[in-house]
Every structure is written in structure tokens, then in C-alpha cells.
């Protein structure tokens, strides 16, 4: 089955620093999504990517869909304390019965004020 | 507009018992997805229901089952509970066949003792 490798597993940074995390897959996806999960909550969608090479921003967040369709990265610029949480990448091969998402294991981000 | 709601928020069961978890999708959404989030394992796909039918199933034993009702709400049933079933169970909904991205509920924390 599809496997997503997400790295790093955790990051501890100072407020104001930029952050970068990525996901790689053994399979091709035609959709990449990035979610954030706060403690005790469900994941919240941050950015959705639908085309290889696509670069999309959402405020201080920027994500890219890799050209090979097997990877994606998420950058957070000028981090703030409320960026703390677990960030998940997710990939999907759409069509037929394949609308399920395959998730990475997450990157735990800690921001030191 | 109400988001995806799950009940109960917490559930404690003993080994061998059955657990029933409930999910109400966003109004207008016809697809419901169930995921298991065990500690350190990310989100694992369990089931996908659309228009009352099971469309896809993850790699879980048959004692994990569910259904979707005519109003598109859904139940997840876990029979013969095992200690390893302890996890956060997340429900997500989307506007059928992946036409919109999935929005998650806050989850049900199941603890098996």
C-alpha cells in the first residue's frame, strides 16, 4: 500500500524562525494536503495542492506539490507560538474507490517564545 | 454552520466489550470517513461511506464495522475490544466522491482497559 514518510518527526524552534517539513511517497499522488492538529482537536486543513509543481500560500504558510508527484513540502515563515501543533501531510489518488487519504505520521512543532 | 460533530468525546470500555461511536457530517455532505489515530501512528484509514454505502475499507479486521444512515450520519462499531484499540477515532465528511476536501470532527477518545 501507499506509504508516506514525513520528516522531521519533531522540531523545536524559536519564535520568529522559519520552519520547513516535507513528505515523500513511494507512490504517485494526484492530490497533496497539509493539515494541522491541535491537542484534543481534529485535523484542520491548511493547504490543498492539485497539480504537480503547484506552489500555494496561505498567509505565512507555503506548500509545494513536487514535480515527480511523490513529494510535497510545507514552509512556515516567521513562526509564532500559536503555530505549535502536529502537522500532517496527506496524499490521495482520486478516482473510483480511492478517495481515501493516506497520512504521514506527523511533525510535532514546538515554538519557544 | 455546524461542523462535523462526534459523540461521545470520551469512551471507556473493558476488553471484550463493544463500542459504538457516532458522527454527524456537515450539512449537505454525503461522504463520511473514519480514521483511527493511535499514539505515534498517525491517522489510519478505516472506512468510507457515501450515499449510504460502504465505498472503501482500510486494513482493519472485520470487528471494525459501521454504517451510514439516510440522513448521512454514521456509526462506527468496534466489537470484541482489545487493548490496542485504544485511540482517537476521527470522523470526516466531504461533499460526496471527494468533490470537496474532508473536514474533521474533534474525535472520540476510546480507552480500552
Image (spheres, coloured by chain):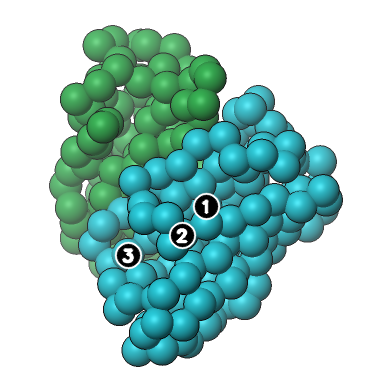
Q: Position of residue B58 (x, y in %)?
A: 40, 44
Q: Is residue B15 visible?
A: yes
Q: Nearest to the eye among marks 3 and 2: give it.
A: 2
Cβ–Cβ below 8 Å for labels 1 and 3? Answer: no
SS class, disc 3: loop
The quadrant holding residue A63 is top left
Chain containing mark 2: B
Q: Position of residue A5 (x, y in %)?
A: 19, 38
Q: Is residue B25 visible?
A: no
Sequence-earlier tag: 3 or 2: 3
The residue tagged 3 is: B38
Cβ–Cβ below 8 Å for labels 1 and 2? Answer: no
Asked if residue B63 lies left or right of residue A17, the reply is right
**Quarter in which the N terminus of chain A is drawn:** top left
Q: Nearer the viewer, residue A52 or A110?
A: A52
The residue tagged 1 is: B34
Whether labels 1 and 3 share one chain:
yes
The quadrant holding residue A27 is top left
User: Which chain did the renderer colour cyan?
Assistant: B
How crowded pointer 1 is (Cα within 10 Å; few <14, some 14-19, many 20+) is rated as many
Q: Residue at x 36, y 20 (%)?
A: A29
Chain containing mark 3: B
Label of residue B64 in the image = 2
Chain containing mark 1: B
Q: Residue at x 53, y 81 (%)?
A: B10
SS class, disc 1: strand
Q: Colour of chain A?
A: green
Asked if residue B7 lies left or right of residue A53, the reply is right
Cβ–Cβ below 8 Å for labels 3 and 2? Answer: no
Amino acid at each position: 500500500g501507499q506509504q508516506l514518510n514525513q520528516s522531521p518527526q519533531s522540531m523545536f524552534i524559536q519564535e520568529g524562525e522559519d520552519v520547513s517539513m516535507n513528505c515523500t511517497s513511494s507512490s504517485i499522488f494526484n492530490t497533496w494536503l497539509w493539515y494541522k492538529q491541535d491537542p484534543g482537536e481534529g485535523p484542520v486543513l491548511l493547504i490543498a495542492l492539485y497539480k504537480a509543481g503547484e506552489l500555494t500560500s496561505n498567509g505565512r504558510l507555503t506548500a509545494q506539490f513536487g514535480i515527480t508527484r511523490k513529494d510535497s513540502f510545507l514552509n512556515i515563515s516567521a513562526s509564532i507560538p500559536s503555530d505549535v501543533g502536529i502537522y500532517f501531510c496527506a496524499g490521495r489518488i482520486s478516482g473510483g474507490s480511492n478517495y481515501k487519504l493516506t497520512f504521514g505520521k506527523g511533525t510535532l512543532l514546538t515554538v519557544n517564545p | 454552520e455546524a461542523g462535523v460533530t462526534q459523540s461521545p468525546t470520551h469512551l471507556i470500555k473493558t476488553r471484550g466489550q463493544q463500542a459504538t461511536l457516532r458522527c454527524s457530517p456537515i450539512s449537505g455532505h454525503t461522504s463520511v470517513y473514519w480514521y483511527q489515530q493511535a499514539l505515534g501512528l498517525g491517522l489510519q484509514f478505516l472506512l468510507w461511506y457515501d450515499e449510504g454505502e460502504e465505498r472503501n475499507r482500510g486494513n482493519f479486521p472485520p470487528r471494525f464495522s459501521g454504517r451510514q444512515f439516510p440522513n448521512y450520519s454514521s456509526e462506527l462499531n468496534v466489537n470484541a475490544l482489545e487493548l490496542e484499540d485504544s485511540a482517537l477515532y476521527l470522523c470526516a465528511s466531504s461533499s460526496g466522491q471527494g468533490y470537496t476536501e474532508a473536514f474533521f470532527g474533534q474525535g472520540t477518545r476510546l480507552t480500552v482497559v
